Image: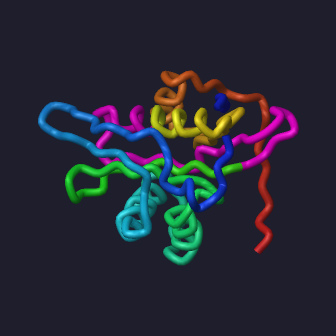
Amino acid sequence: MTLTPRRASTPECAHRAAVPGPVSSGFVTIEIRRAVPDDLTDVLELVAEYCAADGHTYAVETATAGVEPLLHDDRHGTIWFAHEGERPEGYAIVTWGWSIEVGGLDVVLDEIYVRDRNRGTGSRLIELLELDCRQRAVKRIFLETEGPNHDARRLYERHGYTADTSIWMAKELC
């Protein structure tokens, strides 16, 4: 699945991005902002829920090793964090790559998870991460979904993502 949008990989740019606004739905306001180191516990809680919902194994050491560097600077990617007051509501994680095929920076929308769906939070997360990617001159956004996750694909399709003919393959190195 794909899309398009400057590479900022220095700590000075760590929390630079368009200022996100709140998402209001009825009587609730969801705030979305770049995640910071103090959000580690809340983000890990959401990652555990994401893994359970998607049928992935959750290992706190692995999740911490993956999340923690993204909270300190944007050298490897960014985390957008949604919360309702003090309650964590969701997140989206984007990690950087490089592609000869597209002529530059591409990214993977590695994970997106929202606790309470159908309130616009997932759409707002996508809109903000796309805006940030455009500001970084990202050429393409990749993402992957599990076969049975039709709801996620419908969300992505509403935002202009299309199925790609590529088949992703993987090999664990350690």
At 49% across and 74% down in the image, what residue appears? Answer: 60
Q: Is residue 25 left or right of residue 144?
A: left
Q: Is residue 32 left or right of residue 156?
A: left
Is residue 149 shown above or below 174?
above
| Quarter of the image that includes the N terminus | top right
Is residue 84 shown above or below 75?
above
Occupied quadrant, residue 122? top left
Residue at the right extreme? 100
Is residue 134 shown above or below 66?
above
Occupied quadrant, residue 106? top right
At 21% across and 40% down in the image, what residue appears? Answer: 29
Q: Read off the magenta span.
A: 97-125
Q: How many marks?
A: 0
Magenta stretch: includes residue 85: no
Query: Where in the figure is residue 85, as x and y percent of width and height?
Result: 20, 53
Q: Please state which of residues 61 and 74 is positioned toward the viewer in this rendering.
A: 74
Query: Where in the figure is residue 36, as x and y percent of width and height?
Result: 42, 62
| Quarter of the image that includes the C terminus | bottom right
Query: Where in the figure is residue 30, as x and y percent of width and height?
Result: 26, 43
Q: Please state which of residues 23 and 6 is positioned toward the viewer in this rendering.
A: 6
Magenta stretch: includes residue 102: yes
Residue at the front extreme? 12
At 49% across and 27% down in the image, what residue appears? Answer: 154
